[in-house]
Amino acid sequence: MSARTDLLLQLADDELILGWRDSEWTGIAPFLEEDVAFSSIAQNEIGHARALYELAAAELGTSADALAFDRRPEEYRCAPLVELRRLEWARTIARRWLYETADELRLAALKESPDPELAGIAAKMDREETYHRLHAEMWVDRLLATEEGRSRLEEAVEELWPYALGVLDDELRPDLRRRAEERLGRALPEVEPIPRGVHEADLAELWEEMTMVRRSAPAGARW
Amino acid sequence: MRRVFEVFRQERKGQPLQHAGSLVAPDERFAELYAREQYGRRQESAALWLVPREAVHEIGDFPDEFDLKYRRVDGYSIKERLREARERASSAEPAAEGAEGAG
């Protein structure tokens, strides 16, 4: 597999699994308007995953659905950050914010790619991610505005920090640290990043559920 | 902390903005984001107005103690007058506009 396809799958798997995780809030988000907005963001992420899978599928001679659903859990290339099941709002917001901050750095680099297809899809995703970032930043503002909010956000960020570093390659990690520390106004711990390639137990459970329909109709389901 | 915003939606450029519903948000920034998601993400709107409910001045009583029926939209038929005006207009100079406006 080419480095390009590998990169496409990393991005696509991140977006698919995070979109799936965030969609777990549908119907139970803190209030109705947030429920709609959060579900819509989750849907957008899955839309990005589809576009990325399609590019990878063209190279591999397969389909986006096959890449999304027919691989074994251990074959996914997503960062462990997006696999974690933390159905708690402060952690959910902390993850979204950390992910969006990391994703912005990653997309900015990708937009400069000499590969026009990669640069194009990065620019397209970035235009939609702008709203996701806005959403995450607004929540961070609100949480930082009160003592309880700040302590809950900081606790969540600290727990997720090694995972957040693992979303990016070595060279972009210092940028993520600088941005996150500036935003929170405090230093984050020096930790070993939890990189791609290892998987959380949570992923297997998500995979069971996510691929259930597909596996139940191996010949292909139509609806 | 929680504020209600009334949302007005314009379907196409040039059309009037019509009340579409309301939403609850902690502030204007969240209200804008939520309005985009609820009333704009399907490309169903050309523009939205967001109005904090407390900015809306409501009037809900319209007394009519002396039963002035002719002031009501349904209380005064202009059909006959319109026909007469049209007849006059076709036989004489085009001065019928004033007559139509008399209703």
Image: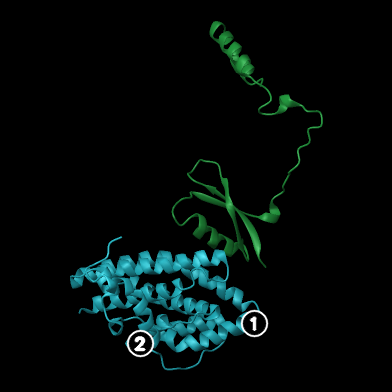
Chain colours: A cyan, B green
Would residue B101 appear left or right of A73 to someone viewing this image?
A: right
Q: How many marks?
A: 2
Q: Vertical placement of A3 versus A43: above or below?
A: below
Which residue is drawn at the image coordinates 31% and 78% (left, top)?
A10
- SS for tag 2? loop
Upstream in the sequence, badge 1 or badge 2? 1
Relative depth, front residue between A208 and A115 = A208
Q: Vertical placement of A83 versus B1: above or below?
A: below
Would residue B41 appear left or right of A7 to someone viewing this image?
A: right
Q: Label 1 marks which chain's residue?
A: A
Quarter occupied by the C terminus of chain A: bottom left
- SS for tag 1? helix
Residue topped by disc 2 = A199
Residue topped by disc 1 = A148
Q: Label 2 marks which chain's residue?
A: A
Residue A215 placement (x, y as % from top left): 28, 74
Disc 2 marks which amino acid? His
Residue A57 placement (x, y as % from top left): 23, 70
Disc 1 marks which amino acid? Glu
